[in-house]
Image: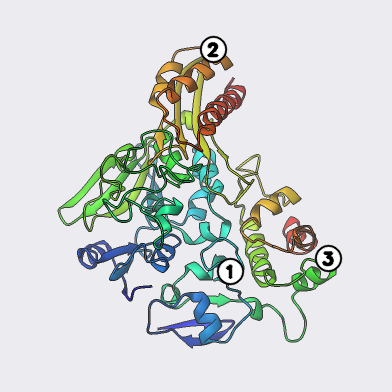
C-alpha cells in the first residue's frame, strides 16, 4: 500500500481514518497544505492527484493508493519558485499566506481543466473553447477562499501566468 | 471518526458481497460521507470503495446516454454529448460545489448524498428526526431560511442538496440498480422519498443495493435546456432555489416542456403542474407566471423561508423566458 508524493514513494497508514491531508502534514511533515476548515469549505488543503485538483481534507489517504500527489512543496524546481508562486508575490496575491498553497495548486489544476475544454457555470457557449476571462477565473477559483481579501491579486497572478499560457 | 475498515470492490458482484451487511456503506468520492463520518453523523463499520466500477459514459441504442455510477462529476459535465445534447445537466453539475469537489465526487454518490440541514449535522445540540428517528426536529421552529417549502412533513423540513439530481429529474432519467435479488431499474422521480413520517430514509434503495448507472433517454428538445441556481453568494453555495427546464416551441406555442425545481423540497421537485398548465399554450410571460403560481400554490413556507415562494416563481418565469427567446 503505497502512494507517491512529490516524486517520492511513501507507505500509506494502516488506519483508514487518516485523511490525505493529515497524512501529508502529520506523517510526511509536508506542512504546505493547510487545514483550514477540514470540511471542504475553504480550499486551503487543495492538492493535485495525477494533475487533478482535489481537497485533501475530504479524502481518505487509502483511497489514493498508487496515485501521484503533488503538494505546493513539489512545484518549485530546485531553488527557483514556480512562475505562479513568483506571480503571487509580484501581484500581492497574499497577506497572511495561509490560503496560498491551496490557491496555487488549485490554479494549476484549473488551467489544465480549461485547456481540456471543461466549461464553467458562467461559460456562455458550453461547446466552445475556454477563454479565461476574469469572470471565468473568479468562478473557477471560487472553491478557494482568502479571508485577507487578496482575491484581486490572486486573479491577476493567475491571469498573467497559467491562464495566459493556455490561450496560445 | 469511529474506526472502520476499508475495502476496494473489484467488480459489482464483489461490491454486493462486501456491501451486504448493515454496517457497510458504499464509498464514491467521499466528499459527503467522509465529512458525515468525521461529524459522527454516519458511523459505517466498513467502507466499500466502488470507484473502480462503472466509470464510462456510453451511447444507448435508443439514442440516449448511460452514465456509470462511478463517473466523476467533472467528467460528466465536460462530456461532449452532455454539453451539446443535455446542456441542463452540464450547467447543473457546474453549479454545484467547487471544482475540487467535482473532481472527486461521483454520480452514484451525488444521488445518495444527505441533506445539508445544519440541525442534521449538529450531533451535539440539536434534535433531528433524520439523524435520530423520533427525536424531534429543531429546524421547524428554528432558523429555517434554507428549508423546504413543498412536500415537507411535521417530522422533517430538510431539502435535497443536489443540483445534478434536479437535472436528472427534469430529464426523466432512469436509475439502474443491482442488489442481492438481482438488477432492477427505477424512474429517477421514484428514487428519492418525501419525508412523511420516516425522514431517516432518503431513498427507496434496499439494504446493500448499489446504484450502477443513470440512463438518460433521448430528448431532442433538451438541447434547448438550462439550469439556473439562486444562492446567497454567486458561487460555491447551496441553492436557495434552482430551476432546470427544457422548452420546445412550435409556431409560438409550447409543444413540450420539462421543469424541475431544486432547493425547495426533500427531493428534486418535478413541476408537473406547471408543465401541464404550459403544454399546448402560448409562450408568454403571463403563461409562465400562471404556471409558476400553479406549481407553488400548495407551498407551506416556514417562519424564515417565505421568500422562496416568490423567488421560485420569478426564477421560473425568467428561465422560461430565456429559453423561449432561444427556442423561437
Q: Which residue is mark 1?
A: A51
Q: What chain letter is assigned to the residue under label 1? A: A
Q: Give the alpha-carbon distance from disc 3 to disc 1, as whole Å.
A: 25 Å
Closer-to-camera residue (B274/A111): B274
Is residue B249 shown left or right of residue B21? right
Closer-to-camera residue (B49/A95): A95
Question: For the point 62% across and 68% down, which residue is it?
Answer: A44
For residue A152, which quarter of the picture? bottom right
Q: Are marks 3 and 2 on the same chain?
A: no
Q: Seen from this angle, which residue lies furthest right?
A: A90
Q: What is the x, y in percent for residue B228?
A: 56, 37
Q: Secondary structure at mark 2?
A: loop
Label 3 Cα neighbours within 10 Å, binned few <14 / some 14-19 / many ≥20: some
Q: What chain letter is assigned to the residue under label 3? A: A
- Quick check: A120 above or below A61? above
Q: What is the x, y in percent for residue B67?
A: 39, 49
Label 2 Cα neighbours within 10 Å, binned few <14 / some 14-19 / many ≥20: few
Is residue A93 shown left or right of residue A65? right
Query: Do the numbered discs 2 and 1 sit on residues whose CB atoms are within 8 Å?
Result: no
- Quick check: B85 above or below B273? below
Disc sitting over residue A87 in the figure: none
Query: Do the numbered discs 3 and 2 sit on residues whose CB atoms are within 8 Å?
Result: no
Q: Secondary structure at mark 1?
A: loop
Q: Which residue is mark 2?
A: B251
Q: Give the alpha-carbon distance from disc 2 to disc 1, as whole Å.
A: 49 Å
Label 1 Cα neighbours within 10 Å, binned few <14 / some 14-19 / many ≥20: some
Looking at the figure, which quarter contains the N terminus of chain A?
bottom left
Q: What is the x, y in percent for residue A130?
A: 67, 50
Q: Are marks 3 and 1 on the same chain?
A: yes
Amino acid at each position: 500500500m503505497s502512494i507517491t508524493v512529490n516524486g517520492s514513494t511513501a507507505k500509506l497508514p494502516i488506519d483508514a481514518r487518516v485523511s490525505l491531508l493529515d497524512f501529508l502534514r502529520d506523517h510526511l511533515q509536508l506542512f504546505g497544505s493547510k487545514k483550514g476548515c477540514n470540511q471542504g469549505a475553504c480550499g486551503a488543503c487543495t492538492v493535485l492527484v495525477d494533475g487533478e485538483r482535489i481537497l485533501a481534507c475530504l479524502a481518505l489517504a487509502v483511497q489514493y493508493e498508487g496515485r501521484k500527489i503533488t503538494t505546493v512543496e513539489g512545484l518549485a524546481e530546485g531553488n527557483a519558485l514556480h512562475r505562479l508562486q513568483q506571480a503571487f508575490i509580484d501581484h500581492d496575491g497574499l497577506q497572511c499566506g495561509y490560503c496560498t498553497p491551496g490557491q496555487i495548486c488549485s490554479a494549476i489544476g484549473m488551467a489544465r481543466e480549461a485547456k481540456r475544454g471543461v466549461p464553467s457555470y458562467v461559460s456562455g457557449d458550453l461547446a466552445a473553447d475556454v477563454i479565461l476571462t476574469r469572470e471565468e477565473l473568479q468562478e473557477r477559483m471560487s472553491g478557494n477562499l482568502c479571508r485577507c481579501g487578496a482575491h484581486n491579486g490572486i486573479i491577476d497572478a493567475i491571469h498573467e501566468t497559467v491562464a495566459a499560457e493556455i490561450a496560445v | 471518526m469511529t474506526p472502520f475498515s476499508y475495502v476496494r470492490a473489484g467488480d459489482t458482484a464483489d461490491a454486493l458481497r462486501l456491501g451486504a451487511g448493515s454496517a457497510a456503506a458504499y464509498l464514491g468520492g467521499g466528499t459527503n460521507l467522509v465529512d458525515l463520518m468525521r461529524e459522527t453523523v454516519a458511523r459505517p463499520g466498513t467502507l466499500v470503495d466502488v470507484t473502480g466500477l462503472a466509470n464510462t459514459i456510453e451511447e444507448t441504442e435508443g439514442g440516449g446516454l448511460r452514465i456509470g455510477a462511478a463517473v466523476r462529476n467533472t467528467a460528466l459535465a465536460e462530456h461532449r454529448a452532455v454539453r451539446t445534447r443535455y446542456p441542463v445537466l452540464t450547467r447543473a453539475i457546474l453549479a454545484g460545489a467547487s471544482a475540487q469537489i467535482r473532481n472527486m465526487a461521483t454520480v452514484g454518490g451525488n444521488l445518495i448524498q444527505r441533506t445539508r440541514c445544519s440541525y442534521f449535522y449538529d450531533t451535539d445540540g440539536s434534535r433531528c428526526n433524520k439523524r435520530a428517528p423520533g427525536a424531534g426536529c429543531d429546524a421547524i421552529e428554528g432558523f429555517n431560511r434554507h428549508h423546504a417549502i413543498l412536500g415537507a412533513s411535521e417530522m422533517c423540513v430538510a431539502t435535497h442538496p443536489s443540483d445534478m439530481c434536479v437535472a436528472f429529474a427534469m430529464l426523466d432519467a432512469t436509475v439502474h440498480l443491482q442488489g442481492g435479488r438481482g438488477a432492477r431499474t427505477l424512474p429517477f422521480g421514484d428514487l428519492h422519498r418525501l419525508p412523511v413520517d420516516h425522514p431517516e430514509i432518503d431513498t427507496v434503495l434496499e439494504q446493500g443495493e448499489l446504484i450502477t448507472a443513470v440512463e438518460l433517454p433521448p430528448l431532442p428538445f433538451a438541447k434547448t435546456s438550462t439550469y439556473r441556481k439562486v444562492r446567497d453568494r454567486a458561487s460555491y453555495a447551496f441553492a436557495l432555489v434552482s430551476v432546470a427546464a427544457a422548452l420546445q416551441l412550435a409556431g409560438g406555442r409550447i409543444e413540450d416542456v420539462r421543469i424541475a425545481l431544486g432547493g425547495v423540497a426533500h427531493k428534486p421537485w418535478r413541476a408537473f403542474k406547471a408543465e401541464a398548465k404550459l403544454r399546448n399554450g402560448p409562450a408568454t410571460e403571463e403563461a409562465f407566471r400562471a404556471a409558476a403560481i400553479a406549481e407553488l400554490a400548495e407551498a407551506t413556507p416556514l417562519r424564515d423561508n417565505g421568500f422562496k415562494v416568490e423567488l421560485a416563481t420569478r426564477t421560473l418565469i425568467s428561465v422560461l423566458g430565456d429559453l423561449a427567446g432561444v427556442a423561437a
